[in-house]
Amino acid sequence: MAIFHTAIKTFSRSRGQSAVAAAAYRGGLLLADMLTGQQHDYRRRSGVVESFCLAPPDAPEWALDPRELWAVAEAAERRKDSTVAREFEISLPHELSEEERAHLAFVLADSLVGRYGFAVQASIHSPGTPEGLNHHVHILATTRRIGSEGFGDKTRELDVGPSGKVEVQWIREMVAATTNAHLEAAGLTNTIDHRSLAEQARSAMERGDDLTAAALSREPTQHLGKRATALAGKGVDTTRARTNDQISEDNQEHYDYLVLKAGLEGKPVPPAGQESGARRGQVFNSDTASLPVGMEMKGVSGVRLQHVLLSSHGLPDHGTPVSLAERIVDALSDVEEISRARADLAMEKTRAGLSWAQRLLSAQGESVELRQWITMAVLQVRALKCLIISRARRLLNLKSATRLRHMAEQEWERFNADYPMGSSGYSHPEWTQRRGRRLSVLETRTAELKLAQERASEQEIGLIDADIAKKAEALEAMPSPPQCQALKPAAPQPLSRDAPAPRRPAPRGPTFH
């Protein structure tokens, strides 16, 4: 089934790396490094399904040609230890067709370009074997934004630090939501989840699904790597493969125990014959499979026919205008949810303003000023709702972390009671390893509980409450639409017969290489 994998790494001269070499290898291209004079020829490399470039709409034409793009990107960095490129490695579902995977890769690359303003080269790779499932795309990005004048500032928000963590989380959420949307468009029911097993377990615990939480609380297996995987395919036993087998056995044993316990307590259990998530590595889907806010297609120039890509699966073209009516409906729904969650917040003025804008939009149509007001109001309402959800989530996480820690403690005590040293069929090293894994889970759950307690402390909740009150006051202080005279659209002036028709700039078509 579809899996989630998103890895981000950088290429630096201090490690002897080159953006030109990385682009040539991933794209199966012949590229020349102008700084060193070295030729990187990977045209005979197999496994490259497709490679294309994307850039912002105002970028120069050479940004769409990898031969020039990476040469200029290398020349733009002067330091001998400069970071010269950043890569996003993303898995593509094997359930999709080759064309559908290409479209998904295009949308993912487009979303990154739209958010960060850099140029990218996206190279789709196929699995190493005919029966393999590891379809993925390497999105190699410049470390600088690019505009009409060429390269500009560095994308520092993606560097290590608080902002980097926020951006990585956004990227992971975007990849999961976009992939799920494409799986749904292809008529598939399986989805992926960008959250860790611990986060998924907490979510299941909040729903009261103890068995799902237990299955998701399983100990993850170790990554085998290329060598161990190749040996396993030949039937050769390895230490890491044996360790993974033991971990899977422990996970299944713990899950079966919880199923039995739930049955004795009269709780619902899975139907007979249904495999547990611990055995088959089930990925539980997130609550939504739609594209997140701000993820609509941006207008970018690329080396592929965008209108063909976007229409091939019935998805909206990026030239389709954003529906203001839908934004207002969503904002009014958010206001109702805010009022139900926090009756102490005054939202009457905001609700009246959105309703007025809805009537004006229906009666007179769209205008620049009306779009600006609606966009500002929608963004502020969404920000307020996110703050309220964040406050509630911290309290729920504290509750679920407490329950997960209690479950880990119960499992630790059960193992010590059922398998005292020397009384089981396990050898001493194996008994020590199994006991140590349970102790490690207990220590992890204890650390998670401590973090949840810190995030849900009175001081932290008080700061969020102050921010909620501040944003609510700012939202209510917005000038109401009837007071904004600029919102009234001016009547169109008829053109004179003698006046020449306004000239429209010819659109720039896609560039191929």
Image (cartoon, rainbow, N blue to C red):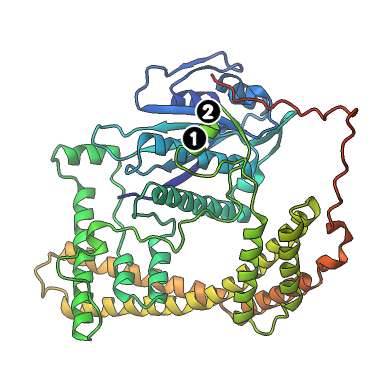
Circle 1 sits on which residue?
309
Is 193 drawn above or below residue 117 in the view shown?
below
Is disc 2 in contact with disc 1, using a CB cutoff of under 8 Å? yes
User: Which element type, helix, strand or loop, lies under badge 1?
Assistant: helix
Q: Amino acid at mark 2?
A: Arg
Q: Is residue 474 left or right of residue 415?
A: right
Give the image quarter of residue 162.
bottom right
> Disc number at residue 443?
none
Circle 2 sits on which residue?
304
Q: Residue reaching furthest left?
A: 425
Q: Is residue 226 left or right of residue 153?
A: left
Q: Is residue 450 left or right of residue 238?
A: right
Is residue 17 in view from this perspective?
A: no
Is residue 449 in view from this perspective?
A: yes
Q: Is residue 154 left or right of residue 195?
A: right
Q: Mark 2 or mark 1: which comes first in sequence?
A: 2
- Taking the spot 39% from the left edge, 42% from the top edge, the residue there is 92
Q: Amino acid at mark 1?
A: Leu
- Taking the spot 64% from the left edge, 50% from the top edge, the residue there is 322
In front: mark 2 or mark 1?
1
Is 513 drawn above or below residue 211 in the view shown?
above
Is 69 drawn above or below residue 424 in the view shown?
above
Residue 34 point in image, percent of width and height: 60, 16
- Taking the spot 55% from the left edge, 76% from the top edge, the residue there is 392
- Crowdedness of circle 1 by 10 Å Cα count: few (<14), some, many (20+)? some
Q: Report the front residue among 106 and 497.
A: 497
Residue 488 point in image, percent of width and height: 84, 57
